[in-house]
Image (cartoon, grey):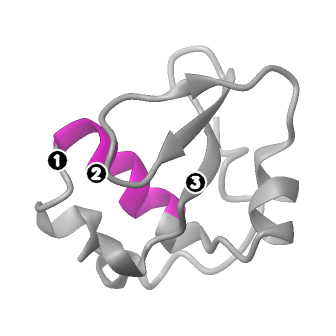
Amino acid sequence: MIDNLPRVCLTRLHSTSETIAIKRGESGFYPMGDYDPDRFNKANGVTPAEVMAMEIGSMFGWDVPGADPAAHAELTEYPYTKRI
C-alpha cells in the first residue's frame, strides 16, 4: 500500500502549526522550520489525500486503511495543511 505514496510530504503539526516532514514508511516526523507545506507538496505533486494518508501512516502504522490515499479521495483542494 505505501509503495504508491510519495517519499516525503510536508504538513503542519496539529498541536503547534509547526511545519513537519513525514517520510514514507517511517513513524513520527521531522521539524522543517519555515517551509510552506502546501507550496512544497504542490511543487512535488503530493496530493492532499496523500498527505492525510501519510499523517495517519506515520502515527498508526502503514498497514492501516487510513494510510491509503484512496480513503481520502474527497480531499482535493489546497490549502489542505492550513486548516488549523
Q: Report the disc number at residue 57.
A: 2
User: What kind of residue is marked 2?
Assistant: Gly
Between residues 56 and 21, which one lies in front from this camera angle? 21
Q: Which quadrant of the figure has residue 45?
A: bottom right
Q: CB under 8 Å between callouts 2 and 1?
A: yes
Position of 84 with respect to 73 (left or right) is right
Residue at (16, 47) in percent of width and height: 61
Secondary element type, mark 1: loop
Residue at (53, 61) in percent of width and height: 7
Q: Residues within 10 Å of mark 2 (few under 14, many from 20)?
A: many
Q: CA distance from mark 2 to mark 1?
A: 5 Å
Q: Is residue 58 magenta?
A: yes
Q: Is residue 45 magenta?
A: no
Say which of marks 2 and 3 sits in front.
Answer: 3
User: What kind of residue is marked 3?
Assistant: Val
Q: Which quadrant of the figure has residue 78?
A: bottom right
Q: Where residue 40 sits in the image (x, y, percent)?
A: 82, 55
Q: Earlier in the sequence, mark 2 or mark 3?
A: 3
Secondary element type, mark 2: helix
The residue labelled by disc 3 is: 8
The magenta segment is: 51-60
Q: Is residue 45 above or below residue 63?
A: below
The residue labelled by disc 1 is: 61
User: What kind of residue is marked 1?
Assistant: Gly
Q: Earlier in the sequence, mark 1 or mark 3?
A: 3
Q: Is residue 63 above or below residue 13?
A: below
Q: Where residue 25 sits in the image (x, y, percent)?
A: 32, 52
Between residues 12 and 29, which one lies in front from this camera angle? 29
Q: CA distance from mark 1 to mark 3?
A: 16 Å
Work out which residue is located at the far left of the displayed protein and give it: 64
Q: CB under 8 Å between callouts 2 and 3?
A: no
Q: CA distance from mark 2 to mark 3?
A: 12 Å
